[in-house]
Amino acid sequence: SDILLEVKELKKYYPVRGGFFRKKIGDVKAVDNISLELKKGETFGLVGESGCGKSTAGRTITRLFKPTGGKIIFDGQDITNLGGSQLRSIRQDIQMVFQDPYASLNPKMMVGSIVSEPLVNYGKGSERKLKAEVMDLLQKVGLPEDAYYKYPHEFSGGQRQRIGIARALALKPKLIVADEPVSALDVSVQSQVLNLLKSLQEEFDLTLLFIAHDLSVVKHMSDRIGVMYLGNLVEIAEADEMYLNPKHPYTKALISAIPQPDPRNKSERIILTGDVPSPQNPPTGCPFHPRCPEAMPECSAKKPQLEEVNEEHRVSCLLYQ
Ligand code: SF4
Ligand code: MG
């Protein structure tokens, strides 16, 4: 099969408690309904505004979180409800790169120990025995040789993210989920880190789920793109198709907000009004209807499903159903 990961109708809800007895009074539907598949070796960009549930989706897919509903099939195995040693063994193959390299690196550990830790934890050898391997990883992510003996605070933000990437690569995973890996970095170093991820992906034969809030960041990275809104996946398409021929009104608005270098391109910026509604109290019908410039009367009553417009393009909008 050329599919590495299959996610079906994934849900992640958090209980909301209130009152004196802290009784459950509702759910925050952080991820309400996501179905997607990752093909082996591809980069899939998952995009949406902050609070849309994309980080929760990433952490649930990697089974850092337990799903509330749905199914996750990784490399042919149902990992939805795995626990204990089985989950631990699967998680060797699924690694994460986090947004904030400061927070995800132990400040008291030398870089050599940070990068070798996952290998040591999985019984691949002692830190001393692994030194050459770790040195090689540091070199592959573009860090100087003496980085091995230094501490995270001695590095710049971009270099720290390189440490995080080396650590994620150490176990030679099949899938890396990178959650906004460059959004905390200076613009000047963002593209360097993106280029690094892209070249390592080829070298290590990785599948990459790349989470970002900005369509222009995923554009050059992704083979396919999924757009999230309020816990739902509203559109999936190949990257070029998504930019040239967006279908969902929300995607159209996001794309219209990307600055156009070509002055002949006179497409108007679509300004969305209103705030993103709370995932605790999502709108009825289409979750986008209160802000949608193309909303129709039935949009507040009927919830659209993700359906094919063609083989490589799916959209969740009543305009196409
Ligand atoms: Fe807009 Fe209706 Fe489509 Fe939702 S279903 S995106 S409200 S047109
Ligand atoms: Mg996030």
Image (tube, grey):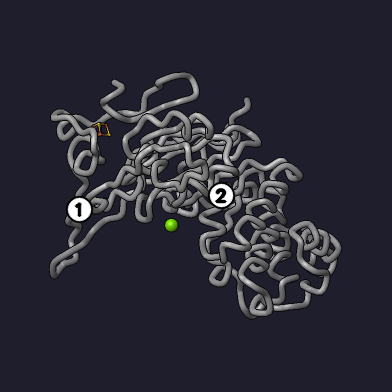
Local crowd size for mark 2, using a 10 Å CA cut-off: few (<14), some (14–19), many (≥20): many
Within 8 Å: ligand 2 and the Cβ of disc 2?
no
Q: Nearer the viewer, residue 163 or 122?
A: 163
Which amino acid type is marked by label 2? Answer: Val
Q: Quadrant of ligand 1?
A: top left
> Is residue 165 depicted above or below 94 in this figure?
below
Front of the two marks 1 and 2: 2
Residue 72, position as x, y percentages in the image: 48, 38
* First in sequence: mark 1 vs mark 2: 1
Q: Which residue is mark 1?
A: 26
Disc number at residue 88? Answer: none
* Residue 285 vs residue 254, the one in the foreground: 254
Name the residue located 58 percent from the left edge and 57 percent from the top edge: 97
Q: Which residue is mark 2?
A: 177
Residue 196 vertical placement versus 163 (above, below): above
Label 1 CA crowd tier, 10 Å (few <14, some 14–19, many 20+) = some
Query: What distance separates the C-alpha of mark 1 from that of mark 2?
Result: 30 Å
Q: Which residue is at a point 24% across and 39% down the rendered structure image? A: 292
- Name the secondary structure under disc 1: strand
The image quadrant that residue 129 belongs to is bottom right
- 284 sits to left or right of 8: left
Can you tell which quarter of the image residue 11 is in?
top left
- Residue at the location (23% across, 43% down)? 291
Say whether residue 27 is visible. Answer: no
Q: Describe the element under mark 2 as helix, strand or loop.
A: strand
Task: Measuring from the top left, give residue 303's x and y in whole percent.
Answer: 23, 32
Three-letter amino acid code at disc 1?
Gly
Nearest the eye: 185 or 287: 185
